[in-house]
Image (cartoon, helix red, strand yellow):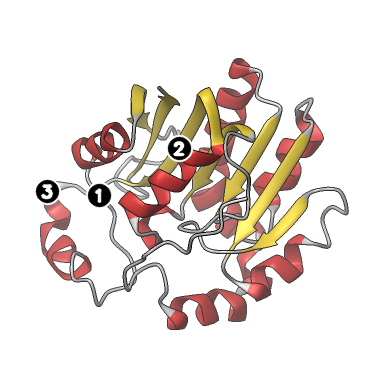
Amino acid sequence: MHSTAATTGNRALNRAITQFFSGVARAYDTAPLQQVVYRPPQHEVVAELRAAGSRRIADIGCGTGILTSRIERELRTEIVYGVDASPGMLAQARNRSATVLWRHAAAEHLPIGDGELDAVVSTTAFHFFDHPVALREFHRVLAPGGLVAIATMRPSASAAALQRVTSSPLFPAHAPSGRATRKLLQDAGFEVTDQRAIRRFPLPPWLVPDMITIGRRA
């Protein structure tokens, strides 16, 4: 197991955000919110895992465990971890499955052994992580050739003003651009194999502008 505590920035350890998600855990599962915001990237991730034949998987920033339990249910898995920093979210998640290994931990310090996994996924949570530190952890826990799939918000030129605010280390979320995300993965030792907008037809892409980036551990 990884025993050295990772050095993280304000975004990763922001207590207000953790408390906020613990407070909204029940509302988080409402059908309209899941249908519009969370389900489309989850569909993409499940398809990638199925195509790769991944069987030892961790869902980082798993929230209430909707995607994590779906991975366990739909794929032929050997082991599935659901990792989240919010106790309130995990309390909801534990009701979904008694066999998923639910872990209360930050993305920057995963309680998972070196090279233990075939795949690490994260949907609509990466913007809350300390990106370089979290990606080093993703790389550490993956076996050579392991899959990483990250779905996150995709900033556009029209969101430049918001990005100037969210780039502050005092703000708890920061969504890197597509180019920046690719470079972050490459710097962490991944080969980026694909990057694309999340499909949300018939909704227009500007309504929820997010993307998925796929890589392999070198």
Q: Quadrant of residue 84?
A: bottom right
Q: Residue at x 81, y 36 (%)?
A: 73
Q: Which residue is mark 1?
A: 176
Q: Residue at x 32, y 46 (%)?
A: 209
Please state which amino acid type lies under the numbered disc 1: Pro
Please state which amino acid type lies under the numbered disc 2: His
Q: Is residue 212 left or right of residue 27?
A: left
Residue 24 screen position, x and y as percent? 59, 76
Give the mark nearest the N terminus, 1 or 2. Answer: 2
How would you rate the neighbour count of disc 3 (Cα within 10 Å): few for under 14, some for 14-19, many for 20 or more?
few
Q: Nearer the viewer, residue 121 or 56?
A: 56
Q: Residue at x 65, y 68 (%)?
A: 89
Please state which amino acid type lies under the numbered disc 3: Ala
Q: Which residue is mark 3?
A: 157
How would you rate the neighbour count of disc 2 (Cα within 10 Å): few for under 14, some for 14-19, many for 20 or more?
many
**Local secondary structure at mark 3:** helix
Q: Are marks 1 and 2 in contact (CB under 8 Å)?
A: no
How many labels sit on residues? Answer: 3
Give the mark nearest the N terminus, 1 or 3. Answer: 3
Residue 139 shows which numbered tag?
Answer: 2
Quadrant holding the C terminus: top left
Nearer to us: label 1 or label 3: 1
Residue 135 screen position, x and y as percent? 39, 45
Q: Is residue 74 above or below residue 6?
A: above
**Local secondary structure at mark 1:** loop
Residue 4 screen position, x and y as percent? 49, 60
